[in-house]
Image (spheres, rainbow, N blue to C red):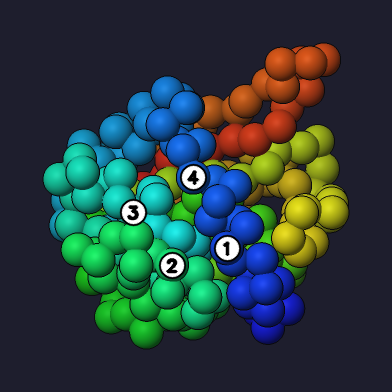
């Protein structure tokens, strides 16, 4: 799966970077969530699945010591070009080349969505491993009534019920701090979510 995801994002990297450009500036809720996260974290932060680097750059503007990792070399090239003051590296969130208990925070903004459900516990365990005790994890994800795949515009992705995701986080050693569930403007259906957790063990 990582190879498929990497190749898909490499192919569509420029179009994807154009698509997300300016989205954060248009979304006060996302900015508020990042602001809370920035206030809570103590120490360096990694954005996993950083794409073209827009979220990491926003955190940097809030005074956070942040760097980014993404599976796609092409997206990392774009991130480095757009934000030369920041550090960006190619890497796989299932096997991070980072020391144990070395970071104050992990941001994963809609980047766990491509992990097959059977792989997600291992991804969360890896995030837990690199965080200091009390470190914070902010996850963005697509929310739904059950775990199910859907046709994302880049490559297959998965929706998760927030309670299932929280349960997996608890099993990995996280405690829930807060959750936000978006409702679509048409029909009131749930569309996306954010889950803030703290390393508790």
Q: Position of residue 72 (x, y in %)?
A: 54, 75
Q: Position of residue 75 (x, y in %)?
A: 50, 69
Residue identified by numbered label 3: 56
Mark nearest the camera among 3 and 1 is: 1
Front residue of this view, candidates 55 and 42:
55
Mark nearest the camera among 3 and 2 is: 2
Residue identified by numbered label 2: 78
Mark 2 or mark 1, earlier in chain: 1
Mark 3 or mark 1, earlier in chain: 1
Q: Is residue 174 left or right of residue 7?
A: left
Q: Residues within 10 Å of mark 1 (few under 14, many from 20)?
A: some
Residue identified by numbered label 1: 14
User: SS at mark 2?
Assistant: helix
Say whether residue 84 is visible: yes
Residue 82 vs 162, above or below: the answer is below
User: SS at mark 4?
Assistant: loop
Q: Residue at x 68, y 21 (%)?
A: 183
As measured in the structure, the alpha-carbon distance from the residue carrying label 2 to the one carrying label 4 is: 12 Å
As measured in the structure, the alpha-carbon distance from the residue carrying label 3 to the one carrying label 4 is: 13 Å
User: SS at mark 1?
Assistant: helix
Q: Is residue 134 left or right of residue 198?
A: left
Mark 4 or mark 1, earlier in chain: 1
As measured in the structure, the alpha-carbon distance from the residue carrying label 4 to the one carrying label 1 is: 11 Å
Residue identified by numbered label 4: 21
Q: Quadrant of residue 99?
A: bottom left
Q: Residue at x 47, y 27 (%)?
A: 26
Q: Is residue 27 left or right of residue 133?
A: right
As measured in the structure, the alpha-carbon distance from the residue carrying label 2 to the one carrying label 1 is: 8 Å
**Callout 2–callout 1 Cβ contact below 8 Å:** yes
Q: Residues within 10 Å of mark 3 (few under 14, many from 20)?
A: many
């Amino acid at each position: 799966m990582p190879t498929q995801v990497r190749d898909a994002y490499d192919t569509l990297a420029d179009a994807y970077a154009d698509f997300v450009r300016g989205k954060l500036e248009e979304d006060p809720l996302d900015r508020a969530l990042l602001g809370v996260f920035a206030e809570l974290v103590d120490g360096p932060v990694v954005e996993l699945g950083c794409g073209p680097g827009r979220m990491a750059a926003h955190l940097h503007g809030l005074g956070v010591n942040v760097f980014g990792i993404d599976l796609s070399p092409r997206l990392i090239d774009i991130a480095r070009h757009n934000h030369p003051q920041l550090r960006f590296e190619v890497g796989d969130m299932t096997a991070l080349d980072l020391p144990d208990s070395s970071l104050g925070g992990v941001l994963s903004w809609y980047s766990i969505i491509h992990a097959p459900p059977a792989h997600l516990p291992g991804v969360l365990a890896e995030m837990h491993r690199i965080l200091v005790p009390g470190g914070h994890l902010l996850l963005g994800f697509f929310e739904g009534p059950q775990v199910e795949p859907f046709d994302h515009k880049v490559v297959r992705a998965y929706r998760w019920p927030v309670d299932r995701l929280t349960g997996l986080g608890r099993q990995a050693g996280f405690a829930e701090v807060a959750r936000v569930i978006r409702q679509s403007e048409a029909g009131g259906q749930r569309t996306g979510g954010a889950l803030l957790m703290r390393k508790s063990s």
